[in-house]
Image: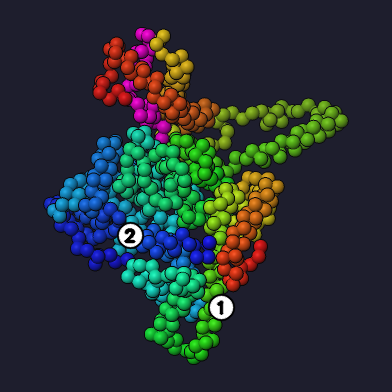
């Protein structure tokens, strides 16, 4: 669609040159511009009505550390016509060489060019981006296929006009009937986005299944979106971490379809037992076997480790990817000062009697488990470890289960304790000025 | 209740922009398919939709009133028919000889009523979607619209075949209630009995 005739493009500040208009939004227009280094960027010019809201959202976003799944904002300012603007990364071109069309998830759904595996990987990536926002108590507020763009092939969250600390926004069809919090809204919207991407249906058509159904894939994906979009808030994912855990589990199930599902085991175990009984009966009735020759014996011995089959490269890649995503986890409780642990330890060492017993036990147990986890992570991250050893240790230690469990617990501690004991610890700390001071006391909570 | 979607019409008479959008979403497909089946080429159906919307929302205000125009279905059918006639007046079909006006009108009514009925059934199914649990609606879709057996549906939804049977029964009951209401509101439309 040619939209250049709608209104003259605005005058740009020095250093930016206009290429063309690429989009129209409720809050303003989006243009493709080029900076003095030759890099192409997207410039969003905000209408006066929405300026304050967008300005606040962009300010919040710029306070956060960068994340690979969140579109980066480069420059902000006012255009000569007075409108607020900002430049950001430009989405890949999904159109032809002469006409630019942003590569969004909505476009990919429309053009029907994604496999289920790709959809899961995109959703997982976006979920990491949402977790990054939630870890800083910020909510996107308008997650939908149109707001997921691809930059150099990687899915990223964009359109931060609704970014806020309360999360009271969204698009019809992507908001739960009774939203509990910003966390809940974002999780619900991501689950609905997954539904749209998988079924190629509009959000209003939920829960109609896709036109063509592959039973194995359908079962894996359906479970995710049915849980994520459940009517009752308690049945939905309680946090983005829970959703990520389920997405990771679904990805690993999808990547390893050879794993026998529980139901098949349920059917096959009685059959195996029957066969064993039959085999033993035949053995006892036909007498003991002949003595084997030495050469036969040597054939029957367990092969040495070197002769065991090669490791599954796909399994290794998946394990490595999942493992790499856990490297930045530092045991922080979301919403608390990073040094809260030192404050807690200082209070616990000097006046344990003033702390609630259950709370202290819960906290100490969490930190002990975190220590075990970091030791295991260091071993897995060691440069000397071979691929085979990595995979063995990764699987035998149930590394991802440990990780997911820790993240869930950190959220549970935060939710269950409802801040009261934490505030008490911080008050005690400041009242007594204990030995291990945090560097920035003004941000103790 | 569903025939004219009275809440929607009320919103429209108050010049509510959400109502306009909703009206477009609800009736767009009906106008499109009626125009297509009346012989308007697919490339020009958007023009008909636009003309009908302009005819119904003259100068941005919603013109329909029950006391003045009668049943909404008849009013909407009349507007669509006029716009299609206008279209053929401006671009007459080159090959076929134009049918006498009375016959053309009767043909149009038949097409429009059939399309209206199927549009209404789609709306009834949307109503069902809102009224039952997602798992129940999935069962309905898979059993009745994809023609899968109870066993296949049970396997897909990880449910027991008995549960599938119960869900199907619940869906049919709800849909029957909705259709009964529709029939009461517009008995002439001759909706199917479930």
The tag on residue A101 is 2
Q: Quadrant of the N terminus of chain A?
A: bottom left
Residue depicted at x 84% and y 28%: A284
Q: Could you say which disc has been placed on residue B110 in the image? A: 1
Chain under numbered label 2 = A
Coordinates of residue B188 in the picture (x, y in percent): 59, 72
Residue at left 58%, top 50%? Answer: B132
| Vertical side of B72 occupied by A260: above or below | above
- Quick one: label 1, few (<14), some, or many (20+) residues within 10 Å? few
Q: How dense is the environment of label 2, judged by Cα within 10 Å: few (below 14), some, or many (20 and up)?
A: some
Q: Is residue A393 left or right of residue A12?
A: right
Residue found farthest to the right: A285
Q: Quadrant of the C terminus of chain A?
A: top left
| Above or below: residue A262 compared with residue A332 | below
For the record, the magenta segment spans A325-351
Label 2–label 1 contact, CB within 8 A: no
Is residue A349 inside the magenta stretch?
yes
């Amino acid at each position: 669609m040619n939209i250049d005739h709608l209104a003259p493009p605005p005058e740009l500040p020095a250093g930016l040159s206009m290429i063309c208009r690429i989009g129209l939004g409720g809050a303003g227009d989006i243009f493709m511009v080029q900076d003095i280094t030759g890099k192409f960027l997207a410039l969003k010019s905000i209408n006066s009505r929405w300026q304050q809201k967008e300005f606040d959202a962009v300010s919040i976003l710029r306070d956060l550390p960068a994340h690979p799944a969140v579109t980066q904002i480069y420059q902000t300012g006012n255009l000569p016509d007075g409108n607020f603007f900002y430049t950001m990364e430009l989405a890949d071109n999904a159109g032809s060489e002469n006409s630019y069309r942003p590569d969004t998830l909505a476009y990919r759904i429309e053009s029907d060019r994604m496999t289920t595996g790709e959809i899961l990987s995109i959703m997982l990536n976006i979920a990491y981006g949402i977790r990054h926002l939630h870890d800083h108590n910020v909510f996107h507020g308008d997650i939908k296929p149109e707001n997921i763009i691809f930059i150099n092939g990687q899915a990223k969250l964009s359109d931060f006009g609704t970014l806020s600390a309360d999360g009271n926004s969204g698009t019809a069809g992507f908001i739960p009937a009774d939203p509990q919090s910003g966390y809940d809204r974002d999780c619900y919207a991501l689950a609905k986005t997954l539904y749209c991407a998988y079924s190629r249906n509009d959000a209003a058509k939920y829960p109609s299944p896709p036109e063509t159904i592959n039973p194995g894939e359908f079962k894996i994906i359906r479970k995710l979106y049915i849980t994520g979009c459940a009517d009752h808030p308690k049945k939905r994912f309680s946090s983005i971490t829970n959703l990520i855990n389920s997405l990771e589990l679904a990805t690993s199930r999808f990547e390893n379809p050879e794993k026998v599902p529980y139901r098949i085991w349920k059917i096959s175990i009685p059959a195996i037992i029957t066969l064993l009984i039959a085999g033993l009966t035949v053995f006892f009735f036909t007498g003991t076997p002949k003595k084997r020759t030495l050469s036969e014996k040597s054939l029957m011995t367990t092969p040495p480790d070197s002769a065991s089959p090669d490791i599954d490269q796909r399994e290794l890649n998946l394990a490595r990817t999942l493992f790499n995503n856990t490297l930045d986890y530092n045991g922080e409780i979301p919403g608390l000062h990073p040094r809260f642990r030192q404050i807690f330890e200082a209070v616990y060492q000097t006046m344990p009697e003033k702390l609630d017993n259950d709370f202290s036990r819960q906290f100490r147990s969490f930190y002990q488990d975190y220590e075990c986890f970091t030791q295991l992570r260091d071993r897995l991250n060691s440069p000397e470890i071979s691929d085979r050893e990595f995979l063995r240790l990764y699987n035998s230690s149930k590394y991802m289960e440990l990780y997911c469990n820790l993240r869930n617990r950190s959220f549970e501690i935060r939710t269950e304790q409802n801040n009261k004991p934490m505030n008490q610890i911080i008050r005690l700390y400041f009242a007594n000025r204990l030995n291990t001071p945090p560097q920035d006391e003004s941000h103790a909570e | 209740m569903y025939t004219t979607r009275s809440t929607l019409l009320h919103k429209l008479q108050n010049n509510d922009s959400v109502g306009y959008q909703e009206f477009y979403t609800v009736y767009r497909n009906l106008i499109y398919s009626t125009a297509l089946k009346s012989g308007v080429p697919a490339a020009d159906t958007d023009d008909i939709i636009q003309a009908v919307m302009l005819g119904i929302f003259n100068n941005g205000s919603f013109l329909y009133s029950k006391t003045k125009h009668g049943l909404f279905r008849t009013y909407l059918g009349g507007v669509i028919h006029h716009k299609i006639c206008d279209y053929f007046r401006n671009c007459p079909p080159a090959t076929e000889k134009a049918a006498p006006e009375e016959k053309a009108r009767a043909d149009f009514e038949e097409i429009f009523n059939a399309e209206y009925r199927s549009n209404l059934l789609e709306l009834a199914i949307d109503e069902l979607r809102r009224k039952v649990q997602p798992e129940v609606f999935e069962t309905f879709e898979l059993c009745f619209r994809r023609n899968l057996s109870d066993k296949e549906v049970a396997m897909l939804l990880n449910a027991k075949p008995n549960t599938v049977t119960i869900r199907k029964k619940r869906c049919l009951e709800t849909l029957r209630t909705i259709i009964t209401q529709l029939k009461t509101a517009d008995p002439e439309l001759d909706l199917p009995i479930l």
